[in-house]
Image (tube, rainbow, N blue to C red):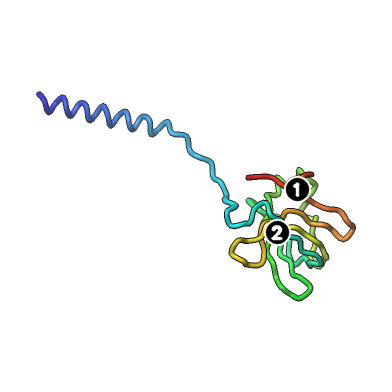
Amino acid sequence: MKSTIIRRGLLACAVAVASVATLAIPGSAHHSTAMFAWGTSTRLDNMTVDRWEWTNPHTFLYAHSADGTRYAFEGMSPNHLVRYGWSRRSLQPGQVISLTHYALRDGRNGGFNVTVTLPNGTTLNQFGESGSRTR
């Protein structure tokens, strides 16, 4: 009799746990910015665009400095950038630009792109007018 009550209690507990587990809401994915010195921008002038990748989930800008040092910069998604005036044609190989970025904490050449100033003086900003945003 006692063992039957214990088994029923365990069964009820297992059913309750399973029921709660089926109601769990999946968490959304989040891309960490911990690898970047977020909020501390560094400016680079006279950078030549090597490649501009208009890809999801993030865009990528590859460029080199006048001394030939190569850099790679991650950016926001195309969907986000379109809202701030960017397009897949915003940057072209061979263009000489200035940019600001949040550097990689490990010292490699590159980081998270914040702004790009085009040869005609137009500045494209990843985060709209203010140039900063916390994620």
* Number of disc labels: 2
Q: Position of residue 86 (x, y in %)?
A: 78, 50
Q: Position of residue 115 (x, y in %)?
A: 76, 54
The residue positioned farthest toward the front in the image shown: 40
Question: Between 49 and 104, which is closer to the camera in this rendering?
Answer: 104
Q: Is residue 10 above or below residue 125?
A: above
Residue at (83%, 65%) from the top-left corner?
Answer: 96
Q: Amino acid at mark 1?
A: Gly
Residue where numbered disc 2 is placed: 53
Q: Which one is earlier in the sequence, the residue at label 1 or at label 2?
A: 2
Q: Which of the two discs, 1 and 2, sits closer to the camera?
A: 1
Q: Amino acid at mark 2?
A: Glu
> Does the CB distance between marks 1 and 2 fall below 8 Å?
no
Question: Label 1 vs label 2: CA separation?
Answer: 21 Å
Quarter of image, res 59 = bottom right
Query: Does 56 sit left or right of 66 as displayed?
Result: left
Query: Does 36 sit left or right of 18 as displayed?
Result: right
The tag on residue 131 is 1
Residue at (67%, 63%) from the top-left corner?
Answer: 110
Q: Position of residue 24 (x, y in %)?
A: 43, 34
Quarter of image, res 17 = top left
Quarter of image, res 71 = bottom right
